[in-house]
Image (cartoon, rainbow, N blue to C red):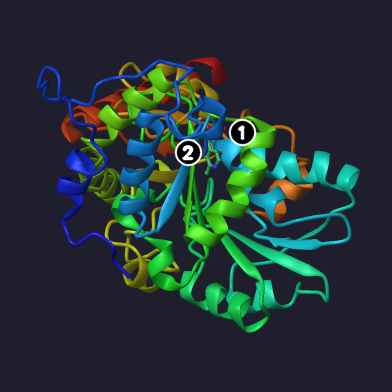
Amino acid sequence: MSLNKQGLNTVCTHVGELEDKQHKGAVSPLYMSTSYAFDDVDVKRYPRYFNTPNQEGLCKKIAALEHAESALIFGSGMAAVSTALMAFLRAGDHVVLQQTLYGGTYNLVTEEFSKYGIEYTFTQGWEPKDFEAKIKENTKVIYVETPSNPLLTITDIAGVSAIAKKHNIVSMIDNTFASPVNQNPIDFGIDIVIHSATKYMGGHSDICAGAVASSKVYMDRIFQLAKNFGGSLSDYTVWLLERSIKTMGIRVRAQNENALAMATYLFGHADIDAVYYPGLPSHKDYELAKRQMRGFGGMLSFELKPYVDASKFQKSLKLIKSSMSLAGVESTLLSPTQTSHALMSAEVRAEQGIRDGLIRFSVGIEEVADLIEDIEQAIADVKVSTSITAN
Ligand SMILES: *Cc1c(COP(=O)(O)O)cnc(C)c1O
C-alpha cells in the first residue's frame, strides 16, 4: 500500500513542507510558539499535543515515507518505543518480543514492565514459528527488530505479521536499522512502525528524536497516551529533522553502497574471522533480506581473528572513531561486549552469538578507499605492537 505515488527522494524533499507565504523562502518556516490564539476552540495547538505547524508537517513526511496513514514524532527513539508499547499493553497483558533487541528496549521491558503488571517473553530464534511458540491467551503485542543489533539477523516480516493477524495481535517493528529507504514493514502487514530518528533520519549525529507510523486508528490510540506521557520534540529539532530527511534517500543509498563494499572487503580479509551483513550472499538470510529490503543498510558487524586485539584495533584507527551511536554520515564502530551489551551477562551474550572480538560498524559516506586504508593501517599497527609485547 503506497499512499503517496511520488518517488523516495521527492517525498524526502517535499512532502509536508510548510509554505512561506510571507517571504516565499525555499524552506519551511520554523514556528517556535508554544501558544497559539484560537479561532476555533476545537483546534488547540500546543507542542505537547503534537500539533504545532512544524510537527504536523514532519509527521506527514514520515507517514509518507513509511506508507502509513499517520505518524507522530517524539523526543527520542525510546519515547517512541515506550509510548507505542504502553498504548497497547495494560496490567495482565503479555507481549512477545524478539530475542535480540536494541539495549534500551531490552532495559525498558526488563526493568519497567513488571511494575505495571505486564508480562513479557523473548523469542528463542528469529523464525515466525519462534514468535508463534511464545503466544499466550493474553498476548496483545508482538515486537520485531530487523535487521537486528548487532548481528544483523533478518526476521521474516510478512511471516510474523501473518501470525499476529491470525491470533488478533498488534504487530510492531523497530525499523531503525533499515530506515524507510530500505524497508517499509507496513507493505508486509506490520501494524506499527517505530524509529529512532536519532539514527538514519537525522543522519548527522546532532539530533535525538523518535517516530511512530501506523493507521489513523492506531495512531489516535498512541496519541492519547503520548500527550499524557509528554514525550514531544522541540520545534527547533523538528525543523532540523525535516531538513535532515531531505537528504536521507541519497545518504542511505550511499551508505548501502559503502557498507556492501566494506563487507565484501572484510569478508575476504586474512585477519577477519566472520562478517555479518545481510547484503552478502554468505549471510544466512540473504534471500529473505532480498525479498523484504530494497537495500541492505549501512550497518555491519565483523569479528577480528583472536590475535588482533579488538580494543587496540579501535584505538589504532585514525579516521573511523569509536562511538556509541550509529547511522551518521561519518563512519563509527564499537565493541558490543564493551559498550551496548556490556550489562548483559556473558552467558546471554554467548546465547545471542555476540563474541568478544565482535565489532559493530556503522558505515558512513566517506570514500571506501580511505576506510579500507584506515582499517589496514590499524590491523598492521596492532600486529606490530602485539608481536613486540610478545617477545
Ligand atoms: C538508538 C536506537 C533506539 C533508541 O533511540 P534513542 O533515540 O536513543 O532513544 C531504538 N532502537 C534502535 C534500533 C536504535 O538503534
Q: Is residue 325 left or right of residue 9?
A: right
Whether residue 387 is visible here, answered yes or no, is no
Whether residue 8 is visible here, answered yes or no, is yes
> Mark 1 and mark 2 in contact (Cβ < 8 Å)?
yes
Question: Would you place residue 206 above or below residue 54 in this image?
Answer: above
Residue under the point 39% across and 42% down: 59
| Amino acid type at image mark 1 | Ser
Q: Quadrant of the C terminus?
A: top right
Nearest to the observer: residue 30 or residue 61: 30
Q: Is residue 323 left or right of residue 332?
A: right
Q: Where is residue 126 shown, x and y percent of the image?
A: 59, 67
Q: Secondary structure at mark 2?
A: strand
Which of the labelled discs sits on residue 360, or is there none?
Answer: 2
Q: Secondary structure at mark 1?
A: loop
Question: Would you place residue 196 above or below residue 311 in this image?
Answer: below
Q: Is residue 58 left or right of residue 229?
A: left
Which of the labelled discs sits on residue 340, or is there none?
Answer: 1
Q: CA distance from mark 2 to mark 1?
A: 10 Å
Task: Say few, some or many: other residues with alpha carbon within 10 Å of mark 2 (under 14 / 14 to 19 / 20 or more).
Answer: many
